Amino acid sequence: MEDDADRPIIRVRGLVKSFGNHTVHDGVDLDVRRGEIIGIVGGSGTGKSVLLHQIVGLLKPDAGRIEVFGESVRDTSDEEYRALRRRWGVMFQDGALFSSLTVRQNVEAPMREQLDLPDDLRETLAGIKVRMVGLPDNAQGKYPSDLSGGMRKRAGFARAIALDPEIVFLDEPTAGLDPIGAAAFDTLIGQLQTALGLTVFMVTHDLDSLHAICDRVAVLAEKKVLAVGTMDEMLKVDHPWVHEYFHGPRARAALAGTASEGD
Amino acid sequence: MTAQRPDRIAPVIATAGGRVELSGDLLIGTVADLVSHAPAPGADVQAVDLSRVERMDTAGAWFVLDLAARLSGGDAPAPIEGASDSQATLLDTVRENMPRATPAPEPRASLTDRIARLGRATYGVGLVAVEMTAFLGQVVAALAGLVLRPRRLRLTSLVHHMQEVGWNAIPIVTLMAFLIGVVLAFQGSAQLRQFGAEVFVVDLIAIAVLRELGILLTAIIVAGRSGSAFTAAIGSMKMREEVSAMRTLGLDPVQILVVPRVLALFLTLPLLGFIADVAGLVGGAVMSWIELGVSPVVFQSRLVANIDLWQFGVGIIKAPFFALIIGVIGCYEGLKVGGNAESLGRLTSTSVVVAIFMVIVVDALFSIFFALVGV
């Protein structure tokens, strides 16, 4: 593990993807470093989620190369892909919990699938994960339809980290949450990232999240990654769209918020 | 997994001089084996030493904390030493989130509980019956309202559903009825031949198909085909809050979703029943000809001479009632769908089962009624 510490944990090169005659990605390059929280931003329809789906192997790129842990995601055998998949967790928008299982069974699902654990150990570990994401004990036996949006997202996060993955992919983790819930979720991501040593790949629109927890930000626009860097670097980019994104009225408000927190 | 990480080190647990020493990787895949090797509680242990542990995940942290707590036998947990900074952070996080004492398992249901549950279930069934009747009332009221104000009828929607439940069902209904006619002729001829009464097979087929089977089997097929489609379509609209959106816009879901569907069934089921009757008779005639040598001409003349129009009337009169049952139950179950996909599936199958069951119950009631009035 130490030997590849300075190698990017995710490496995307020359990625091309189109649906019909609509090209979404045309030459996307991106490196994600081990242990960082990277935020992917971009306008609606710029293919943020498509990029995420391609990295985790749900969609097949038309051209280009995607390496995770130094291995190509597409050129693996089923066995290798299975092993690779165990080392990351994905949280979809709105949690994508299995509606016929309780919250704890949802968190147990990846353990049940991947490992041969005794029942009580699996239940204990799932219980710890559910508590870690800040859900009350009585939520464990509830079904997803009985939970609020914020709780469903937390439960989805608990399922994503069920196997202690090295990378967590989050698709719009704070979308649809109230500001307090969103801030709490940001804090949670930060805490668990430190505690579990996660690398977090986060698709988001939430400028507050970007300011609060992201180490780096990548901007997807014009079918490629337009800029990558820390928030401070992003603020200096003078591409019109990027400038508008990080200097618009909402961006200034978010920036003011983080600045006053620092005082 | 092993292919990915050949460097995984099997964890070892050793007790020496009052210290439990752990080494290797404490990971979710490895701790299960360790649990059985842990020293028994009560052993004189001063500390758990982690200085030779390589990697540790949440499961490993849980194991260490659990071990420390169990070794001390109820007192303050044995101290944990030699953890690296990141391991200490992880241990703290997991310690905060350790499960509390597991709640006692639910006691077995006693006899009174079971009786209470039976009572509640019975009450639930009664409640559903009341609700369904109320819904039927709503639909009938909406239909009656249409008579007063015909312009409120959604004509496009009605025609669409008539095509869906009527026109598109013709092939399957025809084939089914034809085969029923064939089967009746075949079975009937085998029995009647013993008495030399082959020609009575015409009466057998005509009465069975016209009075009962034609319309009953059509209703069952339509319940399976269209009743379930009603539930699924309305149910998925309910799930996506389309029904709530309609209400906020001042549109009545019964008027828009239910009435066109029920009315379409109401208009097309008698026609489908008629088609099924004809197909059944044709099937019977074909088989009688092949099997018994009863020519179509003889079949026709016997049919006209022996079977009065009421035999057909008794069958077809039931069609609108069956249509109402299938339509109302299908739409009612659809509107009951809640937020999750599971309830959609459950209610769709409930809708079909209840509709078929009610169709058969009503058919039985009609039989009694017709026997009493002597038709």
Image (spheres, coloured by chain):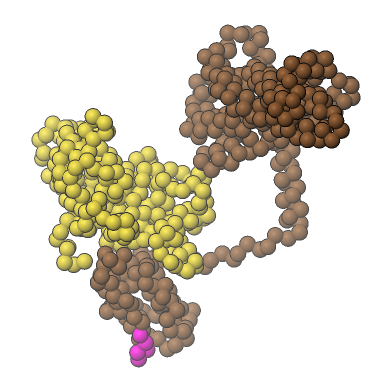
Chain colours: A yellow, B brown
The residue under the point 30% across, 68% down is B2
Q: Observer-nearest residue: B50 or B192?
A: B192
Q: Residue B181 versus residue B339: which sits nearer the camera?
A: B181
Q: Quick one: quadrant of the N terminus of chain B?
A: bottom left
Numbered range of the magenta stretch: B14-18
Is B328 rendered above or below residue A168? above
On the image, the x and y values in percent for residue B201 come to 79, 27
Q: Which residue is pictured at 78% across the width and 32% down the height?
A: B189
Q: Is residue A108 above or below residue B343?
A: below
Residue A80 location, quadrant: bottom left
Q: Is residue B255 visible?
A: no
Residue at 50% x, 30% y is B237
Q: Quadrant of residue B146?
A: top right
Q: In percent of the image, x 29 and y 49: which residue is there? A: A56
The secondary structure making up most of the magenta span is: strand
Residue in the foreground of this view, choosing between A28 and B289: B289
Left or right: B319 as drawn, with respect to A117: right
From the viewer's perspective, is A173 left or right of B248? left
Judge whether residue B162 can be spotted in this image: yes
Q: How many marks?
A: 0
Is residue B347 inside the magenta stretch?
A: no
> In the image, is residue B371 above or below residue B24?
above
**Position of the C terminus of chain B by quadrant:** top right
Residue A92 is left or right of residue B189, and the answer is left
Residue B325 at x, y = what percent? 69, 27
Q: Position of residue B127 (x, y in %)?
A: 71, 37
Q: Quadrant of residue B21?
A: bottom left
The picture places residue A32, in percent across and down from the top left corner, at 19, 52
